[in-house]
Amino acid sequence: MEYVQACMSLHDMNGPFLTGMGLFCVFKYIRHDAGKRTRFNRLHVKITFNHMRAPGEEEENMDYTTQMDAARKGILTEELKRVAEKELFEPAELMRLVAEGKAAIPANRLHTCLEPNGIGSRLKTKINVNLGTSRDCKDLEMELQKVNDAVRMGAESIMDLSSWGDTRTFRRKLTAQCPAIIGTVPIYDAVVYYHKPLKDITSQEWLDIVRMHAEDGVDFMTIHVGINRQTAERFKKAKRLTNIVSRGGSIIFAWMEMTGKENPFYEHFEEILDICQAYDVTLSLGDACRPGCIEDASDISQIEELVTLGELTRRAWEKNVQVIIEGPGHMPLDQIQSNMKIQQTICQGAPFYVLGPLVTDIAPGYDHITAAIGGALAAASGASFLCYVTPAEHLRLPDLDDVKEGIMASKIAAHAADIAKGIKGAAQWDREMSTARKNLDWERMFELSIDPERARKYRESAKPEKEDTCSMCGNFCAVKNMNRILDGEIVSIFDE
């Protein structure tokens, strides 16, 4: 049995107790984090008598680098333990999924206020909220309010896509104060940080921004590493209607075209892995060639990039770096399920993170709905992580109301998928709501609503004559009348 390097004095123990099998205790352990800092956590550990060390016996080293490394060594981290509790999993079962790369727990060791969450097809579907400043919308306080609203509404992840202003201060504020998983796209920040012509940014400067983000405590980073020079040449030959619609993908493609050099993230992938390993940053392998319209869906550029991401996933896992795969944007309904299966096969079950997919191109102003339709089907077919889409998609930076609409649409899609996948506890929420409806228990219905504030507002905006009905049905209420007749009472609609 392996042991954690720990402070084993009685002062450090909390509640040790003996059983017939051994000694169970909770104690503090010390972990040295990439030479940067020391972190104290607590672990529940069982020490069996036949493995207890005699005085002076050398301790085994239980150090680990990443959540994947810990899982492979059989170490129960505090983060994994908390995720297992939330997901109704046995820790050993979740540990196996993390060790295999089929679940990820993004948790930069420097993000000390993090409330950890797991991402994987057998776990509850998680949602991500994109926000951040732009050249035309620089209101930092507005973006912070979006963060607070997103956390309050239950978003598990926030991605800072800021492309203007003091991005590092904002990013550090997020990792210092926000409990949600924090993600970033370093390629955007490089353009802002260096503030010089794109072609003049060096390969090393791109990598230095990745390191900076890791040092700032972000839990996962989108790295557009799948589009290399070979993929770029294939893209140019295979004409597309909407070309490359990924901001990061278009930037690195333009840089390669102007400099004639290889994608630095692809060329120096091992260095990126070393950075991620040192800080326990999860790699979100970006889909530079995701389709930007349904006509481009499932084309050669998208699939070739996915094959490259599958190869890079294996390399990352060899260094115990957790991986998430980013997926398609626009896609017809009939292609979504097959795309999820292709990704699961090529990337060996690594969690799939999808933007939408948007199932039609004709709904600007309503793309939170087109994305929720695609997202529900994608997650039911194996996707693990939905990036929200707001009504402002394709039109402008979302405001506070747009953010709420996008979050709620994504949460509904995620929950609908969880029911279809048989995720533990998912259907119980619906059963409780249905029971409240049967009992005409309005307060309980509000409590169970995905958006209690809106549900209550609608009810109060048109109060019925009688409290046990609503203003649509009144005495025609089927629920009320069935309750009465099955209880042996008389139902008389017009005479009441």
Image: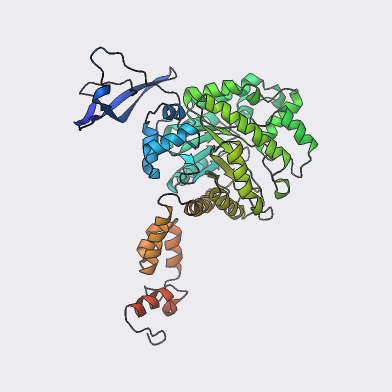
At 60% from the left edge and 48% from the top edge, which residue is drawn? 356
Where is residue 308 drawn, in percent x and y? 65, 32
At 39% from the left edge and 34% from the top edge, which residue is drawn? 79
The image shows a total of numbered marks equal to 0
Residue 355, picture quadrant:
top right
Where is residue 398 drawn, in percent x and y? 58, 47
Where is residue 279 drawn, in percent x and y? 47, 25
Q: Nearer the viewer, residue 405 or 309?
A: 309
Residue 3, picture quadrant:
top left
The C terminus lies in quadrant:
bottom left
Residue farthest along the top direction in this orientation: 56
Placement of 115 over or under 11, stated as above or below: below
Where is residue 187 drawn, in percent x and y? 62, 30
Residue 267, picture quadrant:
top right
Q: In the rendered image, is residue 310 in sight?
A: yes
Placement of 37 over or under 228, stated as above or below: above
At 53% from the left edge and 21% from the top edge, which residue is drawn? 274
Left or right of 287 in this view: 87: left
Placement of 33 over or under 120, stated as above or below: above
Q: Nearer the viewer, residue 250 or 415?
A: 415
Q: In the rendered image, is residue 109 in sight?
A: no
Residue farthest along the bottom direction in this orientation: 495
Left or right of 481 in this view: 254: right
The structure's colour scheme is rainbow
The N terminus lies in quadrant:
top left
Q: Nearer the viewer, residue 136 or 329?
A: 329
Placement of 468 over or under 153, stated as above or below: below
